[in-house]
Image: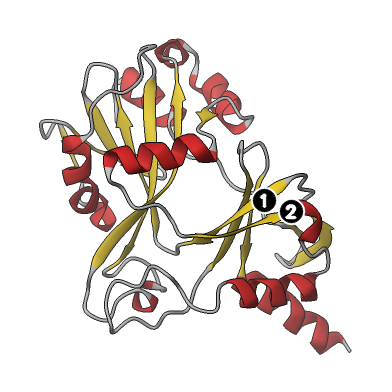
């Protein structure tokens, strides 16, 4: 990617990392007894184990499709990269999306593309090579951001510069565009969330015993985990089964 504009667009529209519900130990990748603090209602959604895709919709109707790290396709075949089936999965959706922001903002649709041969968990969602996607976030930004130096853009993005939709707005947009969201499991008061690692492992198993996004009858149905978020998305965290299993096994071996 040589164009300064495309480089800035790519940097500004990447999805920021979501922290784990219990902090990760930088020494061994295990979980620490430091849970995320939530206040008020917390929305629980399934975390789908695929690859992060994005549709970047410009105010003039132009669009780009990208992976988590790079732009893969531009409207009119100006860029084309078939990596991880992301373009194949998302191009029909991108073709029918229309600019919806009256303030001239760039709108980003963030989706999990999964199934087929995407990652080691693909077989949990399909036994027949099916491919699917689910919308999990929408954010926007003003085009002026693209005039900044790339390092400044990265810092801005990683410190919450992108303006994400609230849960209510996200649901309305998904309905208006006929896009399936990642499954909404339950809404619970923040004080109900477990603080201990063992208790959180049990909480996950009780809320999501099997995936809700299987693509066909041949799927293995083992889920990846849950995303926890406030209605205004001011606090968001993820809890993955494998992190809790690994941490509890390591603790048991020490005894």
Q: Nearer the viewer, residue 236 or 67?
A: 236
**Residue at the spot 27% in from the left edge and 51% down from the top edge:** 86
Residue at image position (68%, 42%) is: 235
Quadrant of the image containing the C terminus: bottom right
Q: Quadrant of residue 6?
A: top left
User: Local crowd at mark 1 within 10 Å, few (<14), some, or many (≥20)?
Assistant: many
Give the Cα separation between the discs numbered 2 and 1: 6 Å
- Does 98 sit above or below residue 122? above
Q: Secondary structure at mark 1?
A: strand
Q: Position of residue 83 (x, y in %)?
A: 26, 53
Residues at marks 2 and 1 touching, judged by CB atoms closer than 8 Å: yes
Q: Which mark is residue 189?
A: 2
Q: Quadrant of residue 30?
A: bottom right
Percent across and percent down for residue 194 are 79, 65
The quadrant holding residue 79 is top left
Q: Is residue 59 above or below residue 74?
A: above
Can residue 71 be seen here? The reply is no
**Residue density around tag 2, few if under 14, some if 14–19, many if 20 or more, within 10 Å:** few
At x 10%, y 31%, the residue is: 76
Q: Which residue is mark 1?
A: 42
> Left or right: 167 with respect to 70?
right
Q: Is residue 107 left or right of residue 22?
A: left
Nearer the observer, 230 or 156: 230
Residue 40 in the image: state x and y as whole percent: 75, 45
Above or below for 36 versus 149 = below
Residue farthest toward the right in the current orientation of the protein:
255
Q: Confirm whether residue 132 shows in the render.
A: yes
Percent coordinates x, y for residue 119 in the rendering: 38, 68
Front one among 149 and 183: 183
- Residue at 43% in and 42% down: 171
Mark 1 or mark 2, which is nearer the start of the sequence? Answer: 1
């Amino acid at each position: 990617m040589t164009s300064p504009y495309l480089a800035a667009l790519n940097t500004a529209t990447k999805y920021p990392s979501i922290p784990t519900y219990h902090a990760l130990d930088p020494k061994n990748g295990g979980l620490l007894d430091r849970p995320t603090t939530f206040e008020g209602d917390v929305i629980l959604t399934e975390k789908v184990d695929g690859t992060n895709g994005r549709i970047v919709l410009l105010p003039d109707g132009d669009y780009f499709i990208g992976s988590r790290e790079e732009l893969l396709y531009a409207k009119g075949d100006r860029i084309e990269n078939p990596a991880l089936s992301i373009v194949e999965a998302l191009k029909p959706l991108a073709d029918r999306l229309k600019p919806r922001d009256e303030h001239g903002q760039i709108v980003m649709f963030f989706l999990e593309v999964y199934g087929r041969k995407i990652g080691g968990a693909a077989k949990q969602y399909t036994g027949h090579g099916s491919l699917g996607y689910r919308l999990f976030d929408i954010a926007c930004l003003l085009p002026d951001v693209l005039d900044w130096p790339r390092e400044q853009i990265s810092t801005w993005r990683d410190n919450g510069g992108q303006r994400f939709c609230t849960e209510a707005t996200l649901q309305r947009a998904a309905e208006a565009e006929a896009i399936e969201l990642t499954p909404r499991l339950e809404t619970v008061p923040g004080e109900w969330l477990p603080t201990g690692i063992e208790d959180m492992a049990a909480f996950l198993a009780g809320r999501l015993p099997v995936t809700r996004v299987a693509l066909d009858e041949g799927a293995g149905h083992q889920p990846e985990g849950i995303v926890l978020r406030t209605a205004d998305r001011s606090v968001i965290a993820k809890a993955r089964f494998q992190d809790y299993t690994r941490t509890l096994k390591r603790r048991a071996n020490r005894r």
